[in-house]
Amino acid sequence: MAIENKAFRHRPQQQAGSGVKCSALIVAAPHSGSGKTTVTAALARYHRNLGRKVTVFKVGPDFIDPMILRQASEELVYQLDLWLVGEQGCQELLYRAAQESDLILIEGVMGLFDGTPSSADLAEYFNIPVLGVIDAKAMAQTFAAVTFGLAKFRENMPFSGVLANRVNSDRHGELLSNSLPDEFTYYGRMPKDDSITLPERHLGLVQAQELADIDSQLDQAASYIANTKLVNLPEKVEFFSAQQTAQLQGNEQALSGTRIIIIRDAAFSFIYAANIAFLKQAGADIIYCSALTDKHLPDGDILYIPGGYPELYAEKLKTNVSFINSVQSFANSQKPIIAECGGMLYLLEQLTDLSGQKFPMLGLLPGKAVMQKKLAAIGSQWVNLSMLCQEQTANPIMRGHSFHYSSAEVSIEPIAQTTHHPSERLGEFVYQHNNILASYMHWYLPSNPSLAIAMFNKSGVTSL
């Protein structure tokens, strides 16, 4: 099927044999909830247990699945998205992974063809074969029809085969396998097993750090891989350098001598691994702390509060008075604070949870937020932050995404509003208040290195 996709118009032609080869697979499905994360994590843990280095990526902007995948592989998990990360950014991440890995696994997002760009786009762009995970618990010959659709809907997309998920009997597995034409590889089945089922909540899976038995769950899931054809490494794919080894474009030490404090705990954990790597590459010193257990902030120049689940820990957050006082003192000293989504809610005056209980927050940003059962916003987006650029010729666009179940009423005028990709409808507001820069938007810092450097300038956003 022909597609209109800008990412394929100027795709560079690479000379075969000039790249690095590594076994690779994209784990995709017809729809969300098919078991992609469980299967990807099981594959990663199985091959890691054999002593192989497994690098796992996640298509799209999700934060929670990468936590599970990192636990399974014991390696950092980066996002791959042809729009958010960029074509060259994805290419360079894959090239570096291929140089040091035995296996690259990429968990898809939503259904295989869903989104702009989709998991299928990534598969075709980099010629990485797709493993289709099909929830076949209530399926017989239709399994073959779904497989046919996944494999044939896009003419140029490489397809490796299918795995039947939540299939408990050998007889059922045989029925599914026998329904497939010979051209499709049937890799086997994963049973429906509550002991490996990952619990969910409103923003997706429960975080890995909250699951006491996560390692035993992953080992149990990996044991099922041993009974499939996935015990063998998939075919090798050749990956090429994007010839863009430095994302900072000459600003490698622009943040040298800057100590960036990042709140990272169960309440605030939604942060791109690429953001942390970017800040370190720029020369910054990263210091972590917890708003739940630490009594005060460590010494630093900038405070970065990522998104997370402040609503689940509101009681504990509000009772950690000494930490709150420390953050307020930090703000009063006019040091910069960068806050995203849940981090922004923490800065507000009040947060109301789903039960209607009201919790006082830091009061550094005028406004209130209320949790709701209905999804408030989701999607990739970009924002023009020209007011933060020192030079008129500078690129003012930062890319990112949002995903939240709360609504906030902030009592100041926003400095900007995001635009959704690809719909171009208006999205989240961006607020600047004294030394605070905050938004529901999660910034993807490598999407604009120069602007990111300006945002994390220890002189503060008011002086940019």
Image (spheres, rainbow, N blue to C red):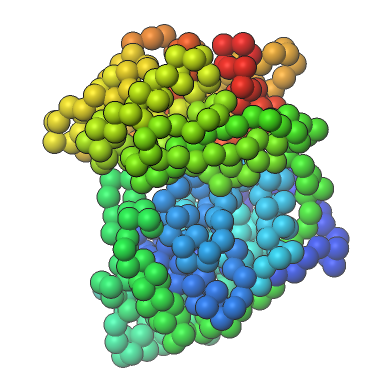
Observer-nearest residue: 326 or 62? 326
> Which residue is painted at 31% across and 63% down in the image?
212
Q: Position of residue 290 (x, y in %)?
A: 40, 40
Residue appearing at x 53%, y 52% in the figure: 59
On the image, the x and y values in percent for residue 365 come to: 37, 17
Q: Residue 32: image x %, image y %? A: 37, 56
Q: Nearer the viewer, residue 422 or 387?
A: 387
In the rendered image, the vertical position of residue 142 relative to residue 207, given as above or below: below
Picture residue at 46% right of the left edge, 85% below the top: 226
Image quarter in which the C terminus is found: top right
State the residue in front, 189 or 407.
Answer: 407
Residue 368 visible at all: yes
**Residue 31 quadrant:** bottom left
**Left or right, residue 6 beside residue 370:** right
Coordinates of residue 55 in the picture (x, y in percent): 60, 63
Q: Nearer the viewer, residue 7 or 344?
A: 344
Is 207 placed above or below 374 here?
Answer: below
